[in-house]
Amino acid sequence: DHLVVLGVMVRKVYFNLRVYRTHAEIIDQTLKLFQDLASGYMSGKQLHRLDAVHYVLCSHTESSFPFLRERGNLRSRTTFYHTLGRLLFMDDATSRFRAFVLPIHNTLCELASVPDVTLRDTTECRRRMIGLSRDLRGLAQATSSRKTYTMVYEWLSPKHTQLFLRALSIWTADTDLAHPILKLFNELALNKTQRITFDASSPGGILLFREISKVVCLYGEYVCQEAVVNAAAQAASAQANAGADIPPAPGTPEPGGGPSGGGGSSRGDVYTLRYKGIWISLMMLTRCLGGGYVNFGVFDLYGDPSLNDAVRWALRMCLSIPVGDLHGYKKL
């Protein structure tokens, strides 16, 4: 019986995720198996019939899956929620979606009530914001239709997106948190399979772009500061000089997709500090401009500076990058 076999596999997945929380490789391989099972059309439908899967969909918090608390499993959180999202959206049930996001909703509301000073100085708040950014990105990746995307977007915006804008303004220099937030909005801006479709009279596309514009402007204002540019350049120069006589190990990949050579590690650091965030921001804006869900003429008609501000900061970010690095980093 297919259901019996799938039931055994799901129980093994559940066991691994609960017991081997500190073993990143086991967690990674287990989630890959779970994702493969959920990705198939027939296997996904069969999984959706299992009580064990419904239990996981109802109890997906850190208390049920302790591996979510481990720093070494941060990347796995996106995969985990992407897989759960695939299973959740099998039937497009609004009531099931509301029950699924209720624990996340409560956590977001709790963090939203925390003052900025406490939010900035509390390590637990920072950890939870990183996790939530990755979780919601995985959930957004699972939306492949207009209905599922609209459910996620209308639940997030504008109440919860304001929290992520606050967090980005507080932790802009913290790449461990800023990059997941940028990737979350980057995913929301992607119109794959025409999932972002608003009614002719709906302002949804305009409101979405205004959120994206705020993110691009906020990050661009930080990353183009002279102090940030100089600090990144000095760090790259110092590390390049320190490691000039140390040849790279054979087969060592270049961090950040940069060119090979003696300054690989320093160039990788510069990529993480500045260029990765710039690349995500530019990709985000590109997806909005080519998504076909925003009437950009409205902004000039009503005197809304969102479009002009986003393009201006995008150009400033591009001009702040040396020509050599533009040629060196393929993603840029």
Image (cartoon, rainbow, N blue to C red):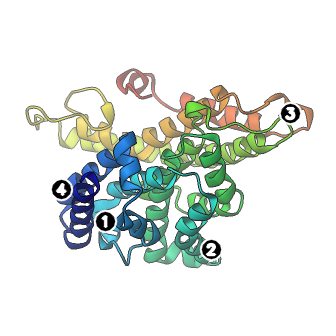
Above or below — where is 175 with respect to 291?
Answer: below
**Residue named by callout 3:** 298
Q: Is residue 221 visible?
A: no
The structure residue drawn at horizontal position 55% and vertical position 33%, both measured from the top left corner, is: 192
The one of 150 and 310 positioned closer to us in this rendering: 150
| SS at badge 3 | helix
**Among numbered discs 2 and 3, the one appearing first in the sequence:** 2
Q: Position of residue 188 (x, y in %)?
A: 58, 44
Q: Residue at x 49, y 45 (%)?
A: 141
Q: Amino acid at mark 3?
A: Val
Q: CA distance from mark 3 to mark 1?
A: 44 Å
> Is residue 151 something that shows in the picture?
yes
Give left or right: position of 289 versus 251: right
In the picture of the structure, the residue carrying the numbered disc 4 is 25
- Check disc 1 and report the residue beneath it: 71
Circle 4 or circle 1, nearest the eye: 4
**Gap between marks 2 and 4 measured at Cα:** 33 Å
Give the spatial CA distance, label 4 vs label 1: 13 Å
Q: Amino acid at mark 4?
A: Glu
Residue 38: horizontal and vertical position, in percent?
Answer: 36, 48
- Quadrant where the C terminus is found in the figure: top left
Q: Which residue is mark 2?
A: 109
Mark in front: 4 vs 3: 4
> Where is residue 177 drawn, in percent x and y?
46, 58
**Whether residue 88 is situated above or below residue 322 in the rendered picture:** below
- Residue 324 % position (x, y): 39, 23
Provide the secondary structure element on which disc 1 rests.
helix
Q: CA distance from mark 2 to mark 1?
A: 23 Å
Q: Residue at x 39, y 52 (%)?
A: 83
Q: Earlier in the sequence, mark 3 or mark 1?
A: 1
